[in-house]
């Protein structure tokens, strides 16, 4: 097969472009200078939980009316029906990234249907109220905790409060034996409830690891995502998604979340709050940094992070996990890399080695991610 040139979007400004053979694909990677300065941009507030009140509109009242016209005897009942109350609908859209809007606007109330009128005029139906949320939002009834819907696709929508039907007017109740009904139906009240919304980002690969290991550097090298990168822990404070493009028109989504530390399950560091964003990924990419002399070794780090993952949810440990030791451009890492990788090998785990700074090992890592995603999709 003819090699295909693949531009991995994102490798950034002032970078040099290199072509790296990737089996029968060649991936064009541009390697940026690793940024050590503090990023200037202030990230948008990332809100991934919200509780809101929704109330649909009541149906309009049916009308009691009788036709009264000059020279028209026996006019009869002509009260029209009430209009429908508006629904409250939640719709998922790729245009939203967080639930921030809902943090500031808690009440979402649709209008009531108009009342019916004489001359059999039906009341006007009210418009629905639409709440737009990011794709990956899960909605529950706040009182019972019951799952209402998982809006996992762009454009998916769900009625969280159904508008009431309009009441029937007296014209509807006329029969041969009851020619002058002096009653009509009231409108049905619209549904109301409190709901909770929880965002769980949808990505194929989720990056986990201790702070400062180079998670954000990798995602910014292989995708257009631009998380803050700096030489101190907890640089990343909110999750970031990046789209990695490969092949003709194929892509997968990779998520960078804030670093974990030992005791995260008990709230240490950033805690486990953001782990839910990699809960639904097909594959975990576990990045380990051994460049620090004082560290206890890659295996120890690997076990510590996995312990935290398991404490968050045992399911996390059932996910395919790719182990990758980063920063192999650094002499301290180079010295130890073979020994460290052997330790994984002896335990039956294939560890990868890469440098997001020079690009060494990145294509192999990407190939493994693509392979594991496809394996998961095929259910193997
Ligand atoms: N030499 C070298 N340095 C790297 C490499 N990858 C990342 N770094 C540096 O390591 C530091 C941490 O990188 P980040 O990408 O911010 O690490 P992180 O894992 O996202 O950190 P947190 O967001 O704090 O969890 C930065 O100073 C990077 O420049 C690499 O491959 N080689
Ligand atoms: Mg980071």
Image: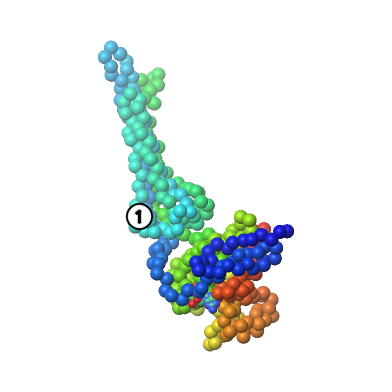
Please, what secondary structure does the residue beneath circle 1 have?
Answer: loop
Residue 299, picture quadrant: bottom right
Does residue 220 sit above or below 326 in this rendering?
A: above
Answer few, some or many: residues within 10 Å of disc 1's Cα (few below 14, many 20 plus, some between 14 and 19).
Answer: some
Residue 280 versus residue 179: which sits nearer the camera? 280
Q: Looking at this rendering, what residue extends furthest in the top direction?
A: 71
Residue under the image location 41 percent in, 50 percent down? 131
Compared across the picture, whether 173 is left or right of 375 comes to: left
Residue 357, picture quadrant: bottom right
Picture quarter with the C terminus: bottom right
**Which residue, given by chain and number where applicable, does mark 1 sit on?**
106
Does residue 28 sit above or below 64 in this rendering?
A: below
Compared across the picture, whether 133 is left or right of 116 comes to: right
Residue 249 location in percent, x, y?
61, 55
Residue 229 location in percent, x, y?
47, 72
Residue 303 location in percent, x, y?
58, 78
| Residue 194 is at least partly visible in this image | yes
Does residue 76 sit above or below 341 in this rendering?
A: above
Residue 140 versus residue 350: which sits nearer the camera? 350
Compared across the picture, whether 126 is left or right of 226 comes to: left
Q: Is mark 1 within 8 Å of ligand 1?
A: no
Residue 176 versus residue 114: which sits nearer the camera? 114
| Residue 187 is at least partly visible in this image | no
Picture quarter with the N terminus: bottom right
Does residue 38 sit above or below 5 in this rendering?
A: below
């Amino acid at each position: 097969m003819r090699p295909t040139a693949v531009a991995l979007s994102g490798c950034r400004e002032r970078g040099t472009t290199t072509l790296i053979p990737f089996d029968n694909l060649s991936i064009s990677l541009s390697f940026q200078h690793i940024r050590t300065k503090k990023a200037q941009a202030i990230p948008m507030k990332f809100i991934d939980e919200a509780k809101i009140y929704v109330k649909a509109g009541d149906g309009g009242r049916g009308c009691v009316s009788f036709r009264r016209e000059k020279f028209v005897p026996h006019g009869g009942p002509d009260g029209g029906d009430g209009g429908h109350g508006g629904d409250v609908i939640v719709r998922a859209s790729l245009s939203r990234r967080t639930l921030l809007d809902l943090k500031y606007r808690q009440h979402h109330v649709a209008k009531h249907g108009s009342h019916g009128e004489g001359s059999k005029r039906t009341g006007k139906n009210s418009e629905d109220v639409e709440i737009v949320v990011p794709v990956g939002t899960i909605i529950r009834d706040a009182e019972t905790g019951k799952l209402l819907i998982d809006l996992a696709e762009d454009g998916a929508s769900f009625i969280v409060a159904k508008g009431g039907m309009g009441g029937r007017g007296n014209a509807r109740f006329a029969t041969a034996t009851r020619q002058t009904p002096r009653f009509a139906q009231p409108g049905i009240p619209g549904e109301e409830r409190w709901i909770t919304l929880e965002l769980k980002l949808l990505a194929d690969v989720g990056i986990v690891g201790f702070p400062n290991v180079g998670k954000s550097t990798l995602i910014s090298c292989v995708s257009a995502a631009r998380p803050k990168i700096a030489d101190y822990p907890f640089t990343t404070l909110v999750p970031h998604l990046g789209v990695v493009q490969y092949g003709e028109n194929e892509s997968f989504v990779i998520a960078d979340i804030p670093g974990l530390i030992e005791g995260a399950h008990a709230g240490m560091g950033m805690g486990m709050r953001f782990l839910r964003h990699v809960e639904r990924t097909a594959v975990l990419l576990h990045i380990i940094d051994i460049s620090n002399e004082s560290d206890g070794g890659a295996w120890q780090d690997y076990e510590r992070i996995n312990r935290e993952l398991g404490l968050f949810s045992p399911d996390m440990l059932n996910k395919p996990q790719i182990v990758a030791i980063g920063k192999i451009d650094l002499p301290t890492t180079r010295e130890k890399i073979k020994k460290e990788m052997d330790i994984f090998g002896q335990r039956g785990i294939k560890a990868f080695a890469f440098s997001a700074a020079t690009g060494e090992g990145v294509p192999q890592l990407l190939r493994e991610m693509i392979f594991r995603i496809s394996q998961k999709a095929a259910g193997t």
